Structure formats: C-alpha cells, structure tokens
Image (tube, helix red, strand yellow):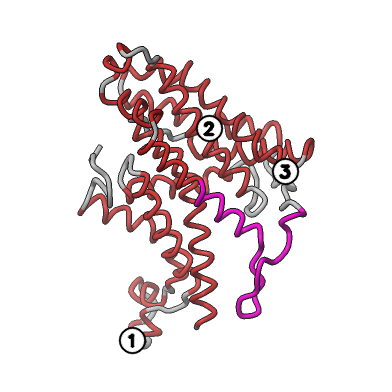
C-alpha cells in the first residue's frame, strides 16, 4: 500500500505538471485575449514533431530551444492572419477557425511524418534512474519534466503579476484604446501573447514527446482533458490551472491504480438477478472508469461553480 501511494503520487504530480505546462499557454491566451483556442493541443503536437526532427539534425538541447520558438512563430502567424481577421465576427468565428485549424495541422503532420509513432527518444544524458523507491527506478527524465514545469509556472506568474510587460498585456485586454494612446501597438501585443502561449504548448510537446508516444493523433489524447483543466481551475486563472492540473493528475493516476468496485465493498449481487445493467455497474472497477472521472468533474464544476476554482468570469 505504501508503494502504491508513493509511486502513484509521484506519477500523479508529474502528469499534473505536464497538464499544467500544456494548459498554461491556453490560460495565458484566454486571460489576455479572451480567445479559447481549440487548436492549442495541435501546437503541442507540432512541438513534439519539431523537437523530434530537430533532435535528429542538431540534438535534443538545441531542439528544446528552437522547437518552441518555431511553434510560437506559427502561433503568431495564426493570430496575425487568421484570428485578427475573425475577431470582429465574435467568439463563434474564432472557435470555428481554431477547430478547423486543428484538423488541418493533424493532416499536415500525417502527410509529413506519417501516422505511425516516430522514434523520439529520451536524451542519453538523462536516460538513467534518478532514485529508487520500493525497488522501482524513477527515471531522471521525469524529474527533468517536473523541474521545467515548475520553472515555467514561477516565471509566468512573476511575469504577469510583477513586471511592466505583464501590466501592459493585461491593460491591453481591458483598455486597448488607452494602451494604444500610450504608444503601445495593441495588435502586436496580442500577437506576441498568442505566440508565447503557442510556444509554451510547443515546449510541452518537446519534453513530453520522448516520454509519451509521438504520433499524428497525440493531440486528440490530451486535447479534451486540457479544457477540463482550464474550466475546473477557472478560465484565465494561472494559479487555478496549476491547482486543477495537479488535482486531475492525482485523481486519474490513483484511480487507474485502484481495482475496487461496489462488488468488492458490499459483496456480489444476488445471482437470481442474472445478467443486467445493474450487475455490470456493480462490478465495474474504479480503474475502468478512471478515464471519465475528469469529465464527470467538469460536469459538476459547470453545474455548481461555472467560474471554476479561482476564475472570475463564467464565459
């Protein structure tokens, strides 16, 4: 039991921080621009594939820097030539644009790299066990992922709350005309914000790619749960996204490790009932329903607290 708790906690925190690293970019974009980007997980996938290709050419560490910059450049181009033109038509037009963009990126990636997983490996310098817990070796690369996620959280929080750049960006959202009169290019500010948010998704892809499977449909696996995180934490709230990421990571990780069911707690149902939906539900284990737990949590949050844990807006 002690081994289960310790290992599941470590894996849950790591998974939660990966979710935060991915959701932080979307949170920044929404909090600063009010744009809910459905293609954000696709930028994560682009980061993974750019990281893979650059790693083959120039090595992992240069790829760790260059790949997010390339994804950020793609994001800025999307904002400048796509979202800026559709913004005047409202949020529905923005959602449709990013929704279509997600499918386009997936098809482009499939055409270039194929649909099969690529051989994106952990760099040799980090391919060793960091420590051993209950005879289980914990990889150093996972610790590296955790450290990067924590550093990004602190850097974002300080930048948005304590620097002049953060104040200008936040003011540009609520009082764009005033910021413009002060000599700042509001359009350029929004473009840079969208680029930074996209680059954060790309960074998540670069560091998660070697640990997870890098393939053309990887955005579909993390994309839906990404929106669970930002809604649960509160739309536009960076601390809320951090807390929600950790909670969802821990909940899902512990749920996968538990095989308990109603039958194991209260005993089997009367055999005379035969096969029925009630019998099936009675025997379903927690591990079997683990994938849907975050979405059940999302439903409950939307019903009882639509603004999320630390959010200040409901739409």
Residue 207 location (% of width, % of height): 62, 47
In-image side of 131 versus 84 (left or right): right
In-image side of 61 versus 284 (left or right): right
Q: Which residue is mark 2?
A: 103
Residue 294 location (% of width, % of height): 39, 57
Does 132 appear in magenta?
A: yes
Nearest the viewer among 279 and 224 is: 224
Residue 116 location (% of width, % of height): 70, 45
Local SS, label 2: helix
Q: Which residues are magenta?
A: 124-151
Label 1 and label 2: CA atoms lie apart by 46 Å
Q: Residue furthest right?
A: 57
Q: 175 above or below 315?
A: above
Asked whether the beta carbons under mark 2 and mark 3 sit within 8 Å of each other, the answer is: no
Q: Residue at x 42, y 58 (%)?
A: 246
Q: Nearer the viewer, mark 2 or mark 3?
A: 3
In-image side of 93 versus 118 (left or right): left
Q: Which residue is mark 1?
A: 266
Label 2 and label 3: CA atoms lie apart by 28 Å
Nearest the viewer among 189 and 290 is: 189
């Amino acid at each position: 039991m002690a081994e289960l708790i310790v290992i599941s906690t470590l894996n849950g925190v790591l998974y939660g921080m990966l979710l935060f690293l991915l959701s932080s970019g979307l949170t920044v974009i929404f909090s600063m621009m009010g744009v809910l980007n459905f293609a954000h997980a696709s930028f994560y996938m682009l980061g993974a594939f750019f990281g893979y290709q650059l790693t083959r050419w120039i090595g992992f560490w240069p790829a760790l820097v260059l790949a997010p910059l390339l994804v950020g450049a793609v994001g800025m181009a999307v904002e400048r030539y796509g979202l800026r033109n559709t913004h005047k038509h409202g949020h529905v037009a923005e959602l449709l644009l990013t929704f279509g963009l997600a499918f386009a990126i997936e098809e482009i990636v499939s055409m270039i790299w194929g649909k099969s997983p690529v051989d994106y490996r952990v760099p040799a310098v980090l391919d060793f066990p960091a420590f051993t817990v209950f005879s289980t070796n914990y990889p150093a690369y996972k610790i590296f992922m955790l450290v990067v996620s924590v550093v990004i959280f602190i850097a974002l929080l300080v930048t948005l709350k304590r620097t002049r750049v953060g104040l200008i960006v936040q003011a540009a959202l609520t009082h764009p005309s005033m910021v413009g009169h002060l000599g700042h290019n509001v359009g350029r500010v929004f473009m840079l914000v969208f680029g930074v948010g996209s680059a954060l998704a790309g960074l998540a892809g670069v560091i998660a790619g070697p640990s997870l499977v890098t393939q053309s449909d990887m955005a579909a696996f993390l994309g839906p749960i990404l929106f669970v995180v930002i809604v649960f934490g509160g739309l536009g709230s960076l601390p809320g996204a951090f807390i929600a990421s950790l909670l969802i990571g821990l909940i899902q990780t512990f749920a996968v490790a538990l095989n308990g069911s109603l039958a194991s707690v209260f005993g089997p149902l009367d055999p005379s009932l035969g096969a029925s939906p009630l019998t099936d539900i009675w025997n379903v284990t927690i591990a079997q329903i683990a994938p849907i737990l975050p979405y059940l949590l999302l439903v409950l949050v939307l019903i009882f607290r639509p603004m999320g844990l630390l959010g200040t807006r409901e739409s």
